[in-house]
Image: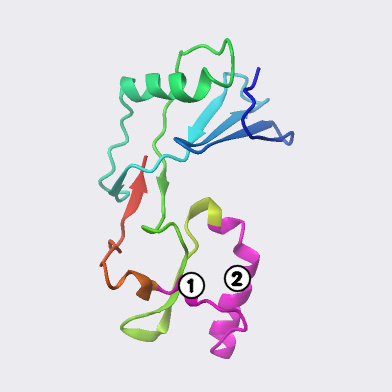
Amino acid sequence: RISSRDVFASMLPGVHLGARRQATGNLWISCNRRRRRGIKVATEHYGSITDASTVDRNVAPAEIEAMHRDYVEPYLAGVSDRCIKTTTCLYTVTSDFGFVIDSHPDSERVLVVSPCSGHGFKHSPAIGEAIAEVVIDGETRFDLSAFSARRFAASAQVASGASLHG
């Protein structure tokens, strides 16, 4: 049983479901036929600012219980609360969750491009085309002003080398 919330499904190569929950983020469930050891449950939960060398990769029992209570029980009746494995993932995001495509403030010869995790992957053909035009022609026909890093200058929201961890 899956609740009546918005649900997305793909049948290849396994079964992948996504349920949109506005209050607590999105839920992703994956059933891989090759593993047959359970289901993968993940959320887009953004926690603290960290980096790969200092992130705490331990997942507390309370977090596991909350994941089952908040994300599994409401959608999948009868799925056990036994957790087989946990993983902490890093997401590269900006404070406004937008992309950064801009020249470096100290050198016009350096182009900073951060399409930010999976969201940017979906836009990679257009981003790649725009970046190729900038590198080859010195400009692009696309308006990239919304992706300027200068939008963070007033509030100094950019943390060098940092990622959000959830």
Q: Mark 1, residues whose alpha carbon is within 10 Å: few (<14), some, or many (≥20)? A: few
In the image, 73 versus 90, the foreground residue is 73
Specify the amino acid type for callout 1. Ala
Answer above or below: position of 54 versus 152.
Answer: above
**Disc assigned to residue 146:** 1
Q: Position of residue 152 (x, y in %)?
A: 33, 69
Q: CA distance from mark 1 to mark 2?
A: 16 Å
- Secondary structure type for disc 1: helix
- Secondary structure type for disc 2: helix
Left or right of 11? Residue 108 is: left
Left or right of 6? Residue 49 is: left
Viewer-side label of 1, 2 = 1
Specify the amino acid type for callout 2. Gly
The answer to which quarter of the image holds residue 121 is bottom right
**The C terminus appears in which quarter of the rendering?**
top left
Closer to the chain start, of discs 1 and 2, is 2
